Image (spheres, helix red, strand yellow):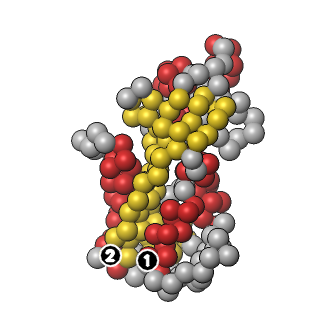
Amino acid sequence: MTLRKPPRPLILASASPRRRILLRRLGLRFRIIPSHVNEKSRQTNTRRLVRELALRKARDVARRNPGAIILGADTLVVCRGKIIGKPRSIAESRRILNLLNGRWQEVYTGVAVVVDGGRRIFTTAVKSRVLARRLGPDALGRLAGKHLDKAGAYAVQDRDDPFIQRIEGDYNNVVGLPLKATHKLLCQAFKKCQAV
């Protein structure tokens, strides 16, 4: 899967190294300008929330770069009805891992593409189901704090991270950027596509 050269500069509104790696798989050149938006919201529907946050990030960067195509994304985990983002401390990481331990959860990623400074907008959200392996207290303690920069406090792409047992749905969505959905949005924004 690849895209032709975008008709104008492409900017990834994220500092995530995983999103950078995944976006490169589409064969695109892009710049990275992380957004610095407030991620608080009253939205309680997770699918709508990740779309809202992805769009907020993309719009933030688009305001300063109106001639570019901006891609924003946001990933959240839901377990037992609780929306989980990135842990703010090792103690919070431990609480999150205890909640997820041995349980199914949903991972949602919202993707937004903003063109013409926000006059054209394309958004989507993707859900995957993930089963966490049941680990003992010592193993959880070793994981706690290892992934403070990731929703759910774990990294499925990390080979040393034994936490995830099974994934149903898009693996890349769990990493942080669902490539098929992103490809589709960028096709709409570029108004031209080439699938390989």
Specify the quadrant of the image occupied by residue 81: top left
Specify the quadrant of the image occupied by residue 84: top left
Residue drawn at (50%, 62%) of the image: 181
Q: Residues within 10 Å of mark 1 (few under 14, many from 20)?
A: many
Q: How far across and down, in percent of the image, does residue 19 sit? A: 58, 57
In the rendered image, the vertical position of residue 172 relative to residue 130, given as above or below: below
In the rendered image, the vertical position of residue 179 relative to residue 100, given as above or below: below
Label 2, label 1: how far apart the Cα atoms are: 8 Å
In the rendered image, the vertical position of residue 165 relative to residue 49, given as above or below: above
Direction front: furthest residue: 168
Q: Residues within 10 Å of mark 2 (few under 14, many from 20)?
A: few
Q: What numbered label is drawn on residue 49?
A: none
The answer to whether 11 appears left or right of 3 in the picture is: left
Mark earlier in primary sequence (2, 1): 2
State how many labels appear: 2
Which element type, helix, strand or loop, lies under badge 2? Answer: strand
Q: Amino acid at mark 1?
A: Ala
Q: Is residue 149 visible?
A: no
Quadrant of the image containing the N terminus: bottom right
Quadrant of the image containing the C terminus: bottom right
> Disc 2 designates what residue?
120
Which residue is more in the foreground, 166 or 42?
166
Which residue is more in the foreground, 147 or 7?
7
